[in-house]
Image (tube, grey):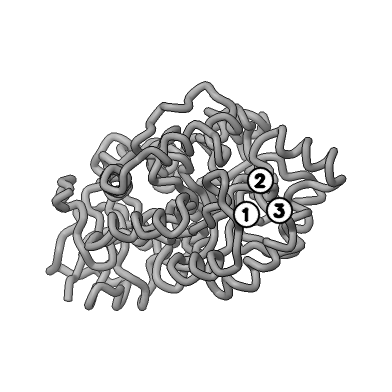
Amino acid sequence: MEVYVNGTVAAGPELELIENATLIVENGKIAAIERQPREHGIDLKGGLVIPAFVDAHTHIADTGAKELGTGMLVEDAVLPPNGLKHRYLQQLSEERLIETIRQGLKEMLKSGVAAFGDFREGGLDGIRALRKASRGLPIRPVILGRPMADYKAGFELTRKELEAVAEEADGFGISSINAFGLEVYHQIREIVGDKVFAIHLSESPRDHENSLQTFGETEVKRAFAFEPDLMVHLTHATESDLVELKARSQRIACCPRTNLILGDGIPPLHEFFARGIPISIGSDNMMFSSPDLFREMDTASRVTRGATKEPRSIDSSYLLRSATFSGAQALKLDRAMGSLEPGKDATFLVLDTSRDPFVYTHDLVSSVVHRCGPSDISRFVCAGTTVIEDFEFKLNL
């Protein structure tokens, strides 16, 4: 049993701040969060204890292609089968692919990421490469595979391959609503069962306009027909989309930094917030953005307030939940992580409140969102495994 004392714990999904709390861990699980201070235990020195991050949408194999597509449109940079990233990925050896994924995992762990949802290109081989790269590490990948016909030209889609992907992966991560016909998505919905069915939607303004002109409906509306668990991007969600998203309690992942650098626009985060629609947040392509959810939250906050010219258009606690509890919900991990509660995994970050981001602060959560970075993590425990201790990364990677 480990007893952590003298910390301010952001407890539960609502991130209730409990000062001078005691966190008790047994067998990698949170046994209790006590409001009464204790004298003896691992001293957190007044640090702020928050849930570790859940990066809801990534493409981790792009780690080896950093900045390769900067300055390009999304279609030219990442669209299969001939986008720049796919040409890059298709020429990698298995050894090189695993090596680059391993580097991405290292960067995630150094940034306080405990779990992530990865759109895994490359069919069964891509799924297996990520499994192999993450073996023995405390980080939890949610591998969302795809068939080879959604990766490389010249492959015929078969139900047998869809079933094989569903068997080996944690679900599906499809590149676009235009990758296949509607009947294929109904088939995926049937095959995937209780696993995660995720899809990119309404990412670029061209995607949005093309859907309206060709089908007379938004991509979001078209996707409601096959009920994906997770809709990624929604940069151009419309008023009518928002009404139905709210009514359906649809899970959403937004990726502000990558949308911005690709010139795709700004997700309507203020509308999601105003309507009480939870979002998860993702760092997306490693070729464009680091897996740093501190930077993701800060960017989301500032661009939303600036674009709306309304400083109250989004809230710091809402954004911190997007990087923790809402991310865990999006990936169906919320029974195990995403919030600090008895019975859940002991998966948390301790931020040193003696450091500059917190000195003279009047709002701890706002300081996390707007001022902190990975260098402020004094301790990171991931499912009971210590990843960072006294600011030092402890894993041999």
Residue located farthest toward the top when viewing the structure as drawn: 71
Secondary element under disc 3, as helix, strand or loop, is loop
Residue located farthest toward the right when viewing the structure as drawn: 216
Where in the figure is residue 248, as x and y percent of width and height? 72, 64
In the rendering, which numbered label is found on residue 275?
Answer: 3
The answer to whether the residues at label 1 and label 2 have Cβ atoms under 8 Å apart is yes
Look at discs 1 and 3 and give the one toward the viewer.
1
Question: Callout 2: 10 Å neighbours few (<14), some, many (20+)?
Answer: many
Where in the figure is residue 336, as x and y percent of width and height? 40, 71
Q: Residue at x 45, y 73 (%)?
A: 335
Quickly name the residue at label 2: 234
Quickly name the residue at label 1: 231
Query: Which image quarter holds the N terminus?
Result: bottom left
Where in the figure is residue 76, as x and y percent of width and height? 57, 29
Closer to the camera in the image, 199 or 4: 199
- Residue type highlighted by circle 2: Leu
Secondary element under disc 2, as helix, strand or loop, is loop
- Residue type highlighted by circle 1: Met
The answer to whether the residues at label 1 and label 3 have Cβ atoms under 8 Å apart is no
Closer to the camera in the image, 324 or 136: 136
Marks 1/3: CA distance?
A: 17 Å
Secondary element under disc 1, as helix, strand or loop, is strand
Q: Residue at x 39, y 54 (%)?
A: 53
Residue 101 visible? The answer is yes
Question: Which of marks 3 and 2 precedes in the sequence?
Answer: 2
